[in-house]
Image (cartoon, rainbow, N blue to C red):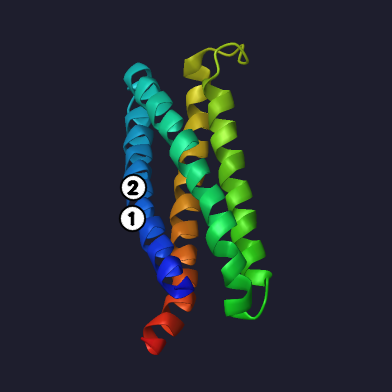
Amino acid sequence: MTTDVTSQRIHALQAEHRQIRVLIGQLAAIEIELRHGGHVGARRVLEEVLQEMSRHVVRHMRQEEAQIFPLLGPAFGSRVPVLALLAEHHTIRMLVDQLASHLDQKANLQPWADRVSPVRLVIRQLAAALELHLRREEAAFGVLVMPMAASA
């Protein structure tokens, strides 16, 4: 029963990973738009994507931390891979917060045009951190799924 539940959770998280990859693609498109001078329209889209990320990605990471990560330590025989994934979650949260602070009109005295370059940098860092993290998690999920498949 536990293996069925774990398998279902992993499949649900993998489906969410596909949704997160869509957000990564949107971030890449926004960065390109900003690079080519589409500051106003790109900013609006970025605000929408950031809201979606704040809701979806942060909730997703909490679920992984509560449901999947506790299973990974015993599967790996070490907590080191889990600690690395947790550190990546922290980095992703930090980058989302950093991006939000760049978009916050009240917190920034600089005009938007002066913030575009740092925003582009954070977008690239966030997209890269998310993609790398998804790959590492999916490899870790394989460690959990392989014993289930072998026992079936």
**Closer-to-camera residue (51/43):** 51
Q: Which quarter of the rendered picture does the N terminus lie within? A: bottom left
**1 and 147: which is toward the camera:** 1
Image quarter in which the C terminus is found: bottom left
Q: Name the residue furthest front.
A: 1
Determine whether 62 is above or below 140 in the image: above
Q: Is residue 106 left or right of residue 27?
A: right
Residue at 37% across / 83% down in the picture?
A: 149
Query: What secondary structure is found at the residue carrying circle 1?
Result: helix
Q: Position of residue 93 (x, y in %)?
A: 58, 42
Q: Is residue 9 left or right of residue 96?
A: left
Question: Which residue is the site of mark 2?
Answer: 19
Picture residue at 45% right of the left edge, 68% below the top: 6
In the picture provided, is 102 more to the left or to the right than 17? right
* Mark 1 and mark 2 residues within 8 Å of each other at the beta carbon: yes
137 lies above or below 56? below
Query: Marks 1 and 2, Cα distance to the nearest angstrom?
Result: 7 Å
Q: Amino acid at mark 2?
A: Gln
| Image location of residue 90, percent across then percent down | 63, 48
Which of the two marks, 1 or 2, is nearer to us in this view?
A: 1
Residue underneath mark 1: 15
